[in-house]
Amino acid sequence: MRDLIVKTSTSLDHKKRQLSFRETIADKGVCSKIEKKLGYKIIKVAPLIQIEDLKQWVRMQAGSDDPPALKCLSIFRKHDSKTGEDKFEYNATGDLFIIHQDNIFVIEFSYILSVDSVSAPSRR
């Protein structure tokens, strides 16, 4: 058996989007649930007229109290041989910088991958 659910949502101003995939697989005594969540939000748009503007903007960002960067990266794994349960989670959030049509976009992103598996306990 294999089920796949896809959900997507976009804000009215198109500055925020979330995408979610959920898949359930049951095969040969193992049930796995895989979930991926991706999201982004445009948090700042700054005009860029010439290359000096980009250099100035980078200098200002480096000196701020909250400089944009990779904010969080975590990996979690747990295996229980008694119950046959296996869990894995990868989580990354941070900021991206994109230059498009004379503007600098600061985009906050999030990516989560979660895998839960349960196998039938082995009989001896």
Image (tube, grey):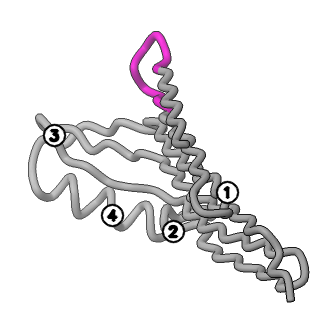
* Residue, disc 2: 70
**Relative to 53, is 115 on the left or the right?**
right
Tell me the kind of residue under disc 1: Cys
On whether residue 17 falls in the magenta region, the answer is yes
Dot 4 falls on a residue whose secondary structure is: helix
Please report whichever mark, 4 or 3, sits nearer to the chain's N-terminal start.
Answer: 4
Tell me the kind of residue under disc 4: Val
| Image: 23 above or below 115 | above
Q: In which quadrant is the N terminus drawn?
A: top right
* Residue, disc 4: 58
Locate residue 93, reporting x and y percent.
Answer: 55, 59
Please report whichever mark, 2 or 3, sits nearer to the chain's N-terminal start.
Answer: 2
Dot 2 falls on a residue whose secondary structure is: loop
In-front residue for pair 104/13? 13
Tell me the kind of residue under disc 3: His
Quadrant of res 3:
top right
Locate residue 11, reporting x and y percent.
Answer: 49, 17
Tell me the kind of residue under disc 2: Leu
Residue at the extreme front of the image, as rendered: 124
The circle drawn on residue 100 is 3
Please report whichever mark, 2 or 4, sits nearer to the chain's N-terminal start.
Answer: 4
Question: Marks 4/3: CA distance?
Answer: 16 Å
Residue at the extreme bottom of the image, as rendered: 124
| Image: 79 above or below 17 | below
The circle drawn on residue 31 is 1
Name the mark nearer the viewer: 2 or 4: 2
From which residue to which does the magenta span run? 10-18
Name the mark nearer the viewer: 4 or 3: 3
